[in-house]
Image (spheres, grey):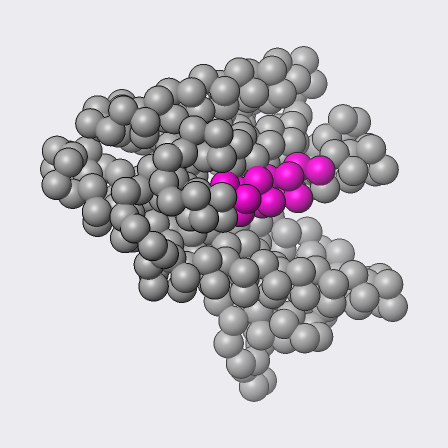
Amino acid sequence: MAVGLNLLFFAFLAVILGTSQSNLYDMLVSNAIAQGVLFFCVVVIPFLITRRMSFVDIAWPFGVALIGAHILMMGDADPVRQTVVGAVYLFIGLRMGLGALTMAKTTGVIFKYEFPRYDYRRTMLDQSGSKFTNAHMLGEAVAQGFANMTVLAVPGFLIATSSIEGISVWEYVGLGLWGLAYLCESVADGQKMYFISKNPKGVCNIGLWKYSRHPNYFSEWLVWTGIVVATLPSWLAIQSVETPLVWISLGICALFASVMLYITLVYLTGAKPAEYYSVQRRAGYKEYQETTNMFFPWFPKNR
């Protein structure tokens, strides 16, 4: 999977750099260089020394913040549009990045030991008979750097270089979805923290957790899906100035931000790894799995 993702993101980068829009090109190149330096220094070198993948939890969010900084400094769209989307990226990146640093300082995770979800990934690779587990894990970490160069940056860059006047209905809808998703994620985190403080070994099934086993991950996916929705009018507006290959690639690239976050939050570092340990450590979690949807919220099933 690591090789496939890196090849896909590299192919995206090669095609979208053929854009006819000089400012979009400059933003893509500048961001690619910045992300490459960030991931080499913060992920690749530490991984080669420690064999821990958790350093990506620092590089990835600060890389998202870098995208926001590029939008604010290099964008040439309507000032309101540019400021709002740049602030959204900065908020997402700095919130998660500073949170990761705080957790690393207080618990020792990242700097002293691996996140359980990456231990899970190593276990799955070993069980599959992989002879190159370390290379595979490093490849997956590097893939997140390529994602910051392409699929996660393109939605923001398209909005920040858009020539359309005023704010589109789709932009209101997308950014409204982002705001709602962030609120739900914060509520879900608060509900779980409250539950765990009262019942440390129990299975959290209150509030939003009654309808999804991972409402926090679902909300994080909606955050990026909202940004993708807001990108639609800016993407449609450049059809006449781009070649069909570049235009379609930019659209697929933007859409893949939502697809990639879904794959990551369900299969790679989110729901599946978390449940691997929850089933072993929490009595009643198996029953919770049987009655509650894993990702998309829905009413609990009757047993």
Q: Which residues are magenta?
A: 85-98
In percent of width and height, residue 259 lies at 38, 49
Is 224 placed left or right of 188 in the picture? left
| Image coordinates for residue 118, horizontal then vertical, percent | 62, 36
Question: Residue 31's quadrant in the figure?
Answer: top left
* Residue name at image x 83 percent, y 38 percent: 107
**Observer-nearest residue: 138 or 63?**
63
Please identify the dominant SS of the magenta region: helix
| Residue 203: % across, % down | 73, 67
- Residue 217 falls in which quadrant of the image? bottom right
Quick check: 78 left or right of 66?
Answer: left
* Residue at the outermost bottom position: 302
In the rendered view, would you say 3 is above or below 286? above
Q: Is residue 191 visible?
A: yes
Residue 227's x, y, as percent? 42, 51
Q: Nearer the viewer, residue 170 or 81?
A: 81
Q: Is residue 144 visible to the viewer in this orientation of the structure?
A: no
